[in-house]
Amino acid sequence: MATLLEVRGLTTHFFTDEGTVEAVDDVSFSVEEGEIVGVVGESGCGKSVSALSVLRLVPDPPGKIVTGEVIFDNQNLLELSDSEMRKIRGNRIGMIFQEPMTSLNPVLTVGKQITEVLELHLKMSKGTALERAQDLLDMVGIPDPKSHLSDYPHQMSGGMRQRVMIAMAISCNPRLIIADEPTTALDVTIQAQILELMQRLSEELGTAMIIITHNLGIVARYAERVVVMYAGNVVEDGTSRQIYYNSRHPYTLGLLDSVPRLDDSEGTSLRPIDGLPPDLIGVGAGCKFSPRCPYAIEKCVSDTPSLKTLSGMENHHRSRCWRAEDIVDMTIQTSIGEQFG
Amino acid sequence: MVESSSKNRTLLEVRNLKTYFPVTSGVIFQRKVAEVKAVDDVSLNIGRGEVLGLVGESGSGKTTLGRTILQLQPATSGDVIFDGVRLNDLSNKELRSIRRRMQVIFQDPYGSLNPRMTCGDIIGEPLNVHNLAKTPREYDDRVADLLETVGLNPFMADRYPHEFSGGQRQRIGIARSLAVNPEFIVCDEPVSALDVSIQAQIINLLEELKERLKLTYLFIAHDLSVVRHISDRVAVMYLGHIVEIASWQELYKNPLHPYTQALLSAIPIPDPDLEMNRDRIILQGELPSPTNPPIGCVFHTRCPVMIDECKAEMPALMEVESNHWVACIRASGYVRGVPV
């Protein structure tokens, strides 16, 4: 498979009165043609800002992409002019945001909002655009699409609005869709409907997807590869099996231990990660996870680790940890320690 | 009545509880045009020291049920009996002494704390309301003690809510509810607004407090994987009705109501290999409006195993296996069931 998107050393800062917030710091990851990549992390880890930076939608001021490259289809998006970028956004890269109520225009009908995209990017006439809009609503599972074209967003439920957002995102046959917490505002049964729909469309249309979420279950179910973020950094990335069964970063391990699972056996207690994520203003040297890390050594506090491919990994599996190579043995040791302690 | 699985004496009993909200039309001469049946004929028991989990999607009436139990919302009909006392017709004064024994923890750690009060004052306010601290010294000691109980530092008493993180704020909310030494706490989605690593801290804290202070919880949440960690029994709610109640192990291994089955299968498990082989039941359609609920079984419009009889009437909750109650005529063993 060919690489569709490659993000290298992306760094986005917010310049505020209180200081510079290093929201995204040296983020690198890639997306292959047609694959689903999950980006996971907790609030404030920089996953949304990374996505906005890829699309160049970071509010400036106060935000600014300081350095890095975003290679999409052999083009560095950060070097394009604003008008060239507008031709890519919504056309070759589709977007789905968390809040379907605020990301749709409340005073335009759903039909108008979809046809607008088609007329602008694909230069369709009003009539063909309207027909295509109807097909799109049908594709995303909206019953009786013709009558819903004249609905306003407030007349629809949250799940329906998210379907409209998806229809808009796929309207121009994009190569890549970036979905930022697409189901966080929805109920579980509706969440399942929307994610199944997205997976089906990705397969049928061959569209690659980046699903940004805090939910490790969603990633396990739908993503082929996973990028884990913490405090503005990518701390680990690899295939979902590598991340879930053979993680080499203490944060990922901690996260997996602290998530309540439906299939936990009786009496398992959750093991939370102690402490809080760091403030991203004036970050010093050292690994940002070291204050909460059970495996931290002196080097972790003094030197900043970089994202390195693990030795002996034929598929790339990278970890930003000084002790990535020792972690396997250590997790075994701690669990034995707990049994006897 | 639905018996609690444990041998504990019943602390809270809810019988045929209904909470309807009128939908009115007109500005001066308001007339009732419809009713939202937020809670419709719910019966349940909670034993002393037990944790009953209550799950359902938004609009299922779980929060209204919690509020009606606490008498924060008057019931349309039915009984709420707390430790042998029927709460529905108590005066405000009589309620106040009962409220000392039942408390609530809210979902939103941002909206439920007064931003103009220090953390110490927020926690100490219930002590003043109920005259529980005789001297200023006693007051300060109690506040410091409560802060330590929930894992915060006593010196933080002088700080304001905005100086705390979401998880710490939820700890303040917990400390406030513990101030009056309650026996029963309604936890209304206490971890939904928090990040995963912080969620686990709060769930563990609530579990530990329950053991240490011998508390009884009604734990409301929309996420079954959270509920299971703390609950002895779980009740599943759909559109104002409880459709299934069982112990967690029973509910997970042997869900009988098609809604419970769909709900369980909709929750992804963080395990890629397991997910690959799991059956997924994807429900069609969305939750119908509670103003105009479907006639017959409320779930029949989305139910994958619906038959014509389902459109006739809402099935009653029946005990089909020991301590496993379900309201579905298609559930195996339903006819053999013992009525509520």
Image: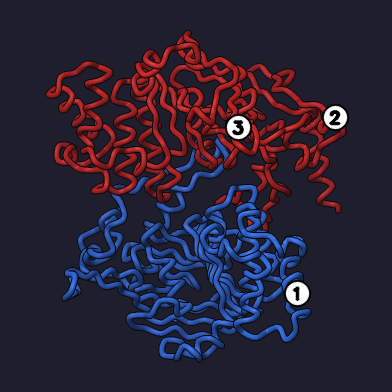
Chain colours: A red, B blue
> Which badge, 2 or 3, is on the more N-terminal residue?
3
Residue B183, located in which quarter of the rendered image? bottom right
Front residue of B328 and A45: A45
Q: Nearer the viewer, mark 2 or mark 1?
A: 1
Relative to residue B272, is residue A329 drawn left or right?
right
Residue under label 2: A299
| Disc 1 with disc 3 on a shared chain | no
Identify the residue at horizontal 45%, vertical 23% (top origin).
A55
Residue A64, located in which quarter of the rendered image? top right
- What element does badge 2 sit on? helix
Residue sticking out furthest to the front: A17
- What element does badge 1 sit on? helix
Residue under label 1: B140
Relative to residue A110, is residue A331 drawn left or right?
right
Residue B317, located in which quarter of the rendered image? bottom left
Q: Label 2 vs label 1: CA separation?
A: 43 Å
- Specify the subunit that label 1 lies on: B
Q: Label 1 vs label 3: CA separation?
A: 40 Å
Identify the residue at horizontal 34%, vertical 77% (top origin).
B18
The spot of residue A160 in percent (x, y) is: 29, 43
Relative to residue B71, is residue A227 drawn left or right?
right
The spot of residue A284 in percent (x, y) is: 76, 31
From this view, report whether residue A157 is shown above or below residue B148: above
Residue under label 3: A23
- What element does badge 3 sit on? strand
Crowd class of label 1 (few under 14; some 14 to 19; many from 20; radius 10 Å): some
Q: Label 2 vs label 3: CA separation?
A: 24 Å
- Specify the subunit that label 3 lies on: A
Identify the residue at horizontal 38%, vertical 75% (top origin).
B42
